[in-house]
Image (cartoon, helix red, strand yellow):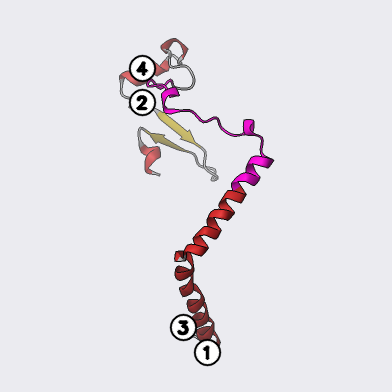
Amino acid sequence: MRASRRQVLAGGAASLILGGCDRIGAAPSFQQLLRVGERLSYRAQRLIVPRSALAPEFAPSDISKIFRPNGSQDSYNLPPAWADLRATNYAAWRLNRVPLRRRSAALHGWQPFLL
């Protein structure tokens, strides 16, 4: 591929402009401008969005040392076949999937993770 004179000039101008970005970003006055903009954005969000709409924040002392999973982990709530699968380390587990084609495929064991 051969670049035209116009493409070379445009590329050179773009590299000169982008080359100055590093110097601008490192300037203390520019960093101060970004901090001011960030504070304004944060305050605008606090004015617009009610505090109750945000996810609650917790102190480290409020977080439980014991994690409780969602849903029920009680064996009496699991399907009857679950105990059999667990006893065989899920060797008989199958996932039938129907692709967009007419032919279906059965995946065995850990094969779904190899797709």
Q: Which residues are magenta?
A: 42-68
User: Are the two marked residues, 3 and 2, in contact with CB atoms closer than 8 angstroms?
Assistant: no
Q: In the drawing, what numbered circle is on residue 92?
A: 2
89, above or below 106, in the image: above
The quadrant of the rendering that contains the C terminus is top left
Image coordinates for residue 81, horizontal then vertical, percent: 41, 17
Residue shown at 46% from the left, 83% from the top: 1
Residue 34 in the figure: left or right of residue 93: right
User: Is 63 colored magenta in this rendering?
Assistant: yes
Give the spatial CA distance, label 4 vs label 2. 9 Å
Q: In the drawing, what numbered circle is on residue 1?
A: 3
Q: Of the residues tagged 3 and 2, which is closer to the observer?
A: 3
Give the spatial CA distance, label 4 vs label 3. 64 Å
Write down the residue under mark 1. Answer: 5
Q: Label 4: few (<14), some or many (≥20) within 10 Å? A: some
Residue type at the position of mark 2: Ala
Question: Foreground residue, 101 or 38?
Answer: 38
Lower position in the chain sequence, tag 1 or tag 2: 1
Query: Regarding mark 1 in the picture, which secondary structure is present there?
Result: helix
Give the spatial CA distance, label 4 vs label 1. 73 Å
Q: In the drawing, what numbered circle is on residue 19?
A: none
Residue 46 in the figure: left or right of residue 56: right
Write down the residue under mark 4. Answer: 84
Query: Regarding mark 2 in the picture, which secondary structure is present there?
Result: loop
